[in-house]
Structure formats: structure tokens, C-alpha cells
Image (cartoon, grey):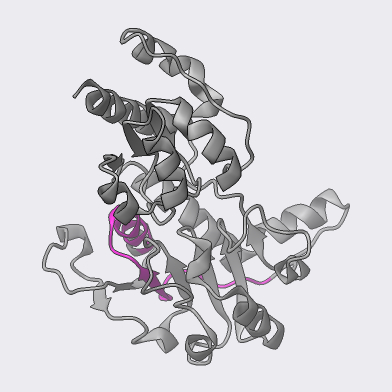
Amino acid sequence: MIAMIDKFRDLFGEKGIDIYYPEMVQALSEDKLLSLVPEYDGWIIGDDPTTRKVLESGKNGLLKAAVKWGVGVDNIDFDAANDLAIPIKNTPNMFGQEVGDITMSYVTALARKTFLVDREVKAGKWPKPRGISLQGKTMGIVGFGDSGKAIAERALVSKMKVISYVRKQTTDIPDQLKQITLSSWPEHIAECDFIVFACSLNKDNWHMLDDEVLSKVKKGVRIVNVARGPLIHEEALVSALQSGNVHSVAFDVFENEPLPLTSSLRNFEQCIFGSHNASNTADAVIRTSQRASQLLLEMLEK
């Protein structure tokens, strides 16, 4: 939204509201937020640490309402927000199709090593890596929300078998997804050729992919994470990559962002890394920013 901020100035300007945005890479620090948040009536939250301390500073200042830009709210202390009577909403169901698109691009790249071919051809070589076909392979998708369903649709079109890991059983399954198998984590994990993480992060699924689960996966499994970094215990994953138990990964998110230069994950050339950017298309940014802006304006007018 910051990169396209001029598109939204009129929306706020019509209400006599000025927009301010700080320079940042991925998120602001708590210390920076403590100085900024109290100065504003409304806050559109990114991946910033929305802690009790930050919210208390806002309550003692001008802050009246906030909106989380996007779906994930694991960075927000809602207990504190409720205690302080600061309303916070988010913008669900905005990015499913975009996340579905990039997930399948990651899956295909891991299967066919297209990114390695690109690197080698640019270096003057002419490689012929032998990949694997998607047809007939099994994809396990953690999460059955907007993104999880979009990914499942694309996997089925590729004639893959799909296992969707859900927190609770549901009968709300679209007709086009009736052939998938609903399961509880980590049942059937040894059947998966690909494991895709597309769920929200909470206290119950922190490091859900750990040493114990990794010991049960199919040897050579490929893993994609387009959700939240802490779902995966990166130290355990590095060991699995070193042993070959995990063939490769495509991560758009990490436990620490940006990915530290010292991260051992950088040692594996067969892996693909993104920059927490799975939802970032012009269409999705405009759609989500408009929704976030409208929600914030509505709350500020109350």
C-alpha cells in the first residue's frame, strides 16, 4: 500500500484526513511504534509488532481504531486491544487467488528445477536436469481457508492428489474440491510428495513442522511455505535438508525477516526463497488497501 499510497490519498482527503507513512523494510520496531502510534487517530497495521505496550501508548495518545492490512493477525495482541477498547479489524479473503498462483509456481519450480536452469544458462551453461511430474503426486496443504482452497483447486487441475490438513472437520467443501481428503496434522504425512503451508499462525501450531514430524515425512519431500515462518522449525529443517530427507523448499516467509545473512538455509542451492511477497500484485494491493481504508474510515466515523 505504501508503494501505491497516492492512489488512496483522495479517499482519506475527502474526509479531511491526512496520511503519514514511515520508511521501512518489512516491519517497524516496537520502539519506533511507541513514538509513532500515539500521534495518529487511525493505524493500518502491516507486520508490525502490535504489542500491549504499543497499544497502551496509542490509547494514551490519539489512537482510536486500527485495521490489519491482510489476513494474518499473529502479530497483534487482541487481548490487549480488547482491554484497552481499541477496535481492530482485518481484511480476510483478499489474497487467495494470488497466493494460489505463486504457490503453484513454487511447486512447479521445485519439481522441474526451472530456477536452477535459469541460473546455469545465464552462466553460459546448458543443463538438462531431470525433474518429476506433478500428475499423480500427492500434495498436503496445511490450511483450508481462502488460500488453501485456491491452492487445492490448482493442484487438482494438475492432476495431483490433495490432502488438506484442517483444525476441525467441516462439511463446507466446494463442489470442485469434493475429491480432496480432509485430515488432521500430521496424519498421512508420509504420503505427501509436497507439503504446502497456507494457514494462520497461532500458539498451537508454532513449529508444527519439527524434528518429530520431519522424521515421518516421505524421503525427498518438497516443502513450500507461503504462510508464516514460525510454522516451521528452521533448525530442524536444515538438518533434514542436509540428510536429504527433505529434497528442497520454497519459502516466501521465514522465522526472522528479512532472512539473516547468517541463515544456514542459504547453503542449499536447490531451494527457492521469496521476500514475504506472495500476495503482492497490483490488483490485490489495490483491492486490499481499499478495503482496509474503508474499514478504518468507518471506525473513525463512529
Residue 51 in sight: no
Q: Between 287 and 88, which is closer to the camera in this rendering?
A: 88
The stretch in magenta equals 130-155
Q: Between 214 and 298, which is closer to the camera in this rendering?
A: 298
Q: Between 208 and 23, which is closer to the camera in this rendering?
A: 23
Q: Magenta span has 137?
A: yes
| Residue 133: percent from left, percent from top | 51, 70
Q: Between 153 and 20, which is closer to the camera in this rendering?
A: 20
Which quadrant is home to the C terminus? top left
230 w.r.t. 9: above or below: below
| Residue 212: percent from left, percent from top | 50, 90
16 w.r.t. 70: above or below: above
Give the residue drawn at x 34%, y 26%.
Answer: 293
**In the figure, residue 184 lies in which quadrant?**
bottom left
195 w.r.t. 2: above or below: below
Give the residue drawn at x 43%, y 32%.
Answer: 285
Give the residue drawn at x 49%, y 46%.
Answer: 47
Q: Magenta span has 149?
A: yes
| Residue 243: percent from left, percent from top | 69, 88
96 w.r.t. 134: above or below: above
In this picture, residue 227 sits left or right of residue 234 = left
In this picture, residue 164 sits left or right of residue 173 = right
Residue 172 in sight: yes
